[in-house]
Amino acid sequence: MIINTDSMQIIDISMPISYSMPVYKGREFKRPIISIDGDFSTGSAYETRLEMNLHTGTHLDTPKHMIPSGYTLEELNISKVIKACKVFDLTSVREKITDKDLMGLPINEGDFILLKTRNSYEDILEGDFVYLDMSGADYLRKLKISGVGIDSLGIERNQPNHGTHISLFNADIMILEGVILKDVEEGEYLLNAAPIFIPGAEAAPVRAYLLK
């Protein structure tokens, strides 16, 4: 969703939460359940309950997700996810983003980057989605970026020992998953990807948007 104001453009890159939304590998137990605790037929207020995995839809991972000694949300420096970012168009990539796909892109130390792939256009989020492989993660780690987001429900897929996550987490690189980049052009933006504050949690949902 794009909102144009007199002074800026606001682009919502968040995935709507519903039972029928795409979930990781289509696993039924990962589908969010939304129920009504009370409505106007039983009282004077309307209240809704949400039950879901914290890695549902658009969400931020912290190192605890894959590293036993990793930190959780209360230790997150919020400035790491509210900052300038760069969107790169990698829609030509068919299976996985490697170091070769990233070489030559204007990525600098401290950048937060978003990887736009064919995931944003094709119905593949529950299947063989495009992901960032180990070589791509190692390349970004060497560049010392601050964060990376991708338009898939996981930054990696079927990699042994979760190499992509661990390579990035060991360098304290933020991982933002499940963004929607279909309507986003390649370029520079201001990113707001602040997660819900859940102390002790390894991940949390995000209402992510870009400002231009």
Image (tube, rainbow, N blue to C red):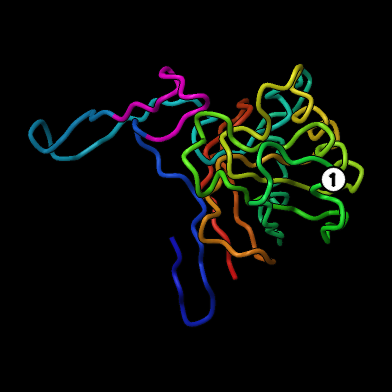
66 above or below 128? above
Left or right of 112 in this view: 119 = left
Residue 85 covered by magenta stretch:
no
Q: Position of residue 123 (x, y in %)?
A: 46, 39
Q: Which residues are magenta?
A: 21-34
Left or right of 201 in this view: 182: left
Q: Quadrant of residue 187?
A: bottom right
Residue located 55% across and 30% down the image: 55
Magenta stretch: includes residue 32: yes
Outermost residue toward the left in this view: 41
| Residue type beneath disc 1 | Lys
Residue 40, position as x, y percentages in the image: 11, 38
- On the rendered structure, is 198 left or right of 145? left
Q: Quadrant of the N terminus?
A: bottom left
- SS of the residue under disc 1: helix
Q: Nearer the viewer, residue 212 or 23?
A: 23
- Image location (x, y in percent) of residue 179: 56, 46
Q: Which residue is mark 1?
A: 100
Which residue is at a point 34% across and 26% down the rendered structure image?
A: 33
In the rendered image, the quadrant that contains the C terminus is bottom right
Vertical side of 85 occupied by 23: above or below: above
Mark 1 surroundings within 10 Å by alpha-carbon count, few (fewer than 14), some (14 through 19), many (20 or more): few
Identify the residue at image location x=82%, y=58%.
Answer: 105
- Residue at the far right: name it: 142
